[in-house]
Image (cartoon, grey):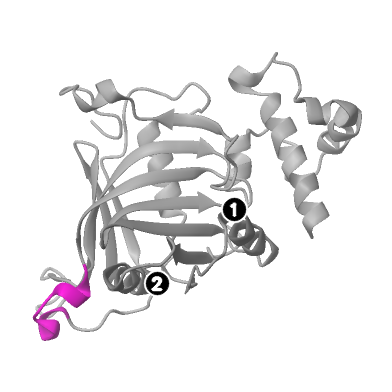
Amino acid sequence: MLRRNVRLRREYIYRKSLEGKEQGKPIPTELRNEEAELRREIDLEDENTAIPKTNIDDEYASASEKDPKILLTTSRNPSAPLTQFVKELKIVFPNAQRMNRGGQVISEIIETCRAHDFTDVVLVHEHRGVPDGIIISHLPFGPTAYFGLLNVVTRHDIKDKKAIGTMPEAYPHLILNNFSTKDVLPVLALNLGQRTANILKHLFPVPKPDTKRIITFANQADYISFRHHIYEKRGGPKSIELKEIGPRFELRLYQVKLGTMDQSEAQTEWVIRPYMNTSKKQKILGD
């Protein structure tokens, strides 16, 4: 399995070197001796490769074929609030499994997840007992999105437990609001807002039409609000009652890398710069 992953990773790097702004640059040193063989393998067309694709297509090529399978973990020695928050995220994300980090390093976690066909690793970290960041790393080759985490309110923190009720585990409908900007990333055929929406939406499987659970990612001024509701139609089809069931939090994107979180050498696709924090008019995720 390890040898297979190494081979697939080499093919992925080689494909990426042939496209976009990487085109024309020297082939990575570790692949030069294998260029002819890699080119032959990639040129063997089938129904999936007859139409030229980019490495961005490869990242989520099998997303429509199987449901996402997510591993949830934390930074080392998590506090009680962080542990509680991750327990709630396990129910928020269908098909998620929670793992106690222990002494495991990130590279071991990623390799284990690849071997067991996980599609994503979500790592939540904290500062002085307050959840303050979340990393979403898509497998097997990326991308990895780094978010700041703000204003976390867990179901555990809500005093009126009867008002929020129980959290259903049905696959939710998704609402992705205001993820479209005019600026297109130079290495992609889509903008950063669409890129971020793709990373988020592929954490969830396709729901059934009659599902009454709704998850919303709403972008405003580059802060993404996460909200979790269920709805009921007690007064008929035109009367819809929404009930928030938690948790709730805000996300702030600060980096996207073309690789998994264990790859320190992965290309940085986008990163927030200091001047972006002082620019009042610039909006990077949505208009």
Residue type at mark 1? Leu
The image position of residue 254, as x and y in percent, is 35, 37
The image position of residue 23, as x and y in percent, is 67, 17
- Seen at 39% across and 33% down, the residue is 192
- Seen at 30% across and 29% down, the residue is 284
Magenta-tinted stretch: 154-164
Mark 1: secondary structure: loop
Precedes in sequence: disc 1 or disc 2: 2
- Is 144 one of the magenta-colored residues? no
Residue 49 is at least partly visible in this image: no
Check disc 2 and report the residue beneath it.
Answer: 90
- Seen at 50% across and 31% down, the residue is 268
In front of the other: 221 or 253: 253
| Left or right position of 59 against 95 | right
Check disc 1 and report the residue beneath it.
Answer: 139
Residue type at mark 2? Lys
| Residue 13, quarter of picture | top right
Mark 2: secondary structure: helix
Q: Say few, some or many: other residues with alpha carbon within 10 Å of mark 1 (under 14 / 14 to 19 / 20 or more).
A: many
- Is 158 one of the magenta-colored residues? yes
* Count of marks overlaid on the render: 2
| Left or right position of 101 against 196 | right
Whole-angstrom CA distance, mark 1 to mark 2, is 18 Å
Residue 54: assigned label: none
| Residue 277, quarter of picture | top left
Residue 278 is at least partly visible in this image: yes
Tell me if residue 269 comes above or below residue 198 in the rendering. above
- The dominant secondary structure in magenta is helix
